Image: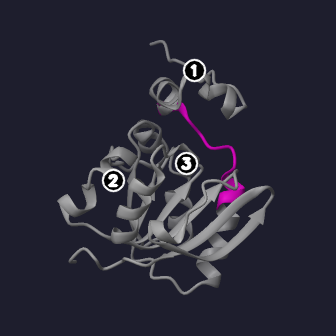
């Protein structure tokens, strides 16, 4: 059996030269985020320093399961729904769990209201800068999630109040930005 190997560049800008979709369709099942320890530090800090309800978590754009694995190390009894339309195989290979194939487009098209689901916390790690229509993704998330954590190597995207989110906390660890938001619109969907 011949196994395809990951041949992406260390530079994500270089990897994305043919488009984000192209890169993840080609390499998604092999993808691993190299910033695991920083993601863990960021999530541990938020978990231990803010009184959030972590009962039902959405790991949005879950990659190969870094966030899910870290959260289950912190609290093994969490209910976590993970999703990624490109890296669900890498997620399954690393965690043994099944990821939904939900995309940002699905959220923009009303997924959460259609299936009547909500979450206490959504974590978006190393993917927020890939969202092409920010308002159309953030606003529906604000109706379905009480808190949002964005972990990113970029200052962008800037999440504005009109998108349904209030910035509660921002920090920088090893050039990685972590922002915690609270929704203005949570509980809009009947639970």
What x and y, as percent, mark residue 43?
A: 62, 68
Residue count near mark 2 (Cα–Cα under 10 Å), binned few <14, some 14–19, many ≥20: some
Residue that protrudes farthest toward the right in the picture: 174
Count all numbered tags in the image, as a single digit: 3
Instruction: Using the image, tell me which numbered label, if any, was put on residue 178.
Output: none
What x and y, as percent, mark residue 136?
A: 39, 54
Residue 136, compared with residue 142, is above or below; it is above
| 190 left or right, relative to 62 | left
Secondary structure at badge 3 equals loop
Secondary structure at badge 2 equals helix
Disc nearest the viewer among 1 and 2: 2
Q: Who's the residue at 44% across and 71% down the image?
A: 164
Marks 3 and 2, how far apart at CA = 14 Å
Residue count near mark 1 (Cα–Cα under 10 Å), binned few <14, some 14–19, many ≥20: few
Instruction: Using the image, tell me which numbered label, if any, was put on residue 127.
Output: 3
Marks 1 and 3, how far apart at CA = 23 Å
Mark 3–mark 2 CB contact (< 8 Å): no
Q: What residue sits right under mark 2 in the picture? A: 107
- Quarter of the image for the N terminus: give it: top left
Q: Which residues are magenta?
A: 29-39
Marks 1 and 2, how far apart at CA = 31 Å
Secondary structure at badge 1 equals loop
| 41 left or right, relative to 118 | right
What x and y, as percent, mark residue 172?
A: 76, 64
Instruction: Using the image, tell me which numbered label, if any, was put on residue 5.
Output: 1
Between 57 and 72, the one lying in front of the other is 57
Disc nearest the viewer among 1 and 3: 3
Q: Is residue 27 visible?
A: yes
| 164 left or right, relative to 176 | left
Mark 1–mark 2 CB contact (< 8 Å): no
Magenta stretch contains residue 33: yes
């Amino acid at each position: 059996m011949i196994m395809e190997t990951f041949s992406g560049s260390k530079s994500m800008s270089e990897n994305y030269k043919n488009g984000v979709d192209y890169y993840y369709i080609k390499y998604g099942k092999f993808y691993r985020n190299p910033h695991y320890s920083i993601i863990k530090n960021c999530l541990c800090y938020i978990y231990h320093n803010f009184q959030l309800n972590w009962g039902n978590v959405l790991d949005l754009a879950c990659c190969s399961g870094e966030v899910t694995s870290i959260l289950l190390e912190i609290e093994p009894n969490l209910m976590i729904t993970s999703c990624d339309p490109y890296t669900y195989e890498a997620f399954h290979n690393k965690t043994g769990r099944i990821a939904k194939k939900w995309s940002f487009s699905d959220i923009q098209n009303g997924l959460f209201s259609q299936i009547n689901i909500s979450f206490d916390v959504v974590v978006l790690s190393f993917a927020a800068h890939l969202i092409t229509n920010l308002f159309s993704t953030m606003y529906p998330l604000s109706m379905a999630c009480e808190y949002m954590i964005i972990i990113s190597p970029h200052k962008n995207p800037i999440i504005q109040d009109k998108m349904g989110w209030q910035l509660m906390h921002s920090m920088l660890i090893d050039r990685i930005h972590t922002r915690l938001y609270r929704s203005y619109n949570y509980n809009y969907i009947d639970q």
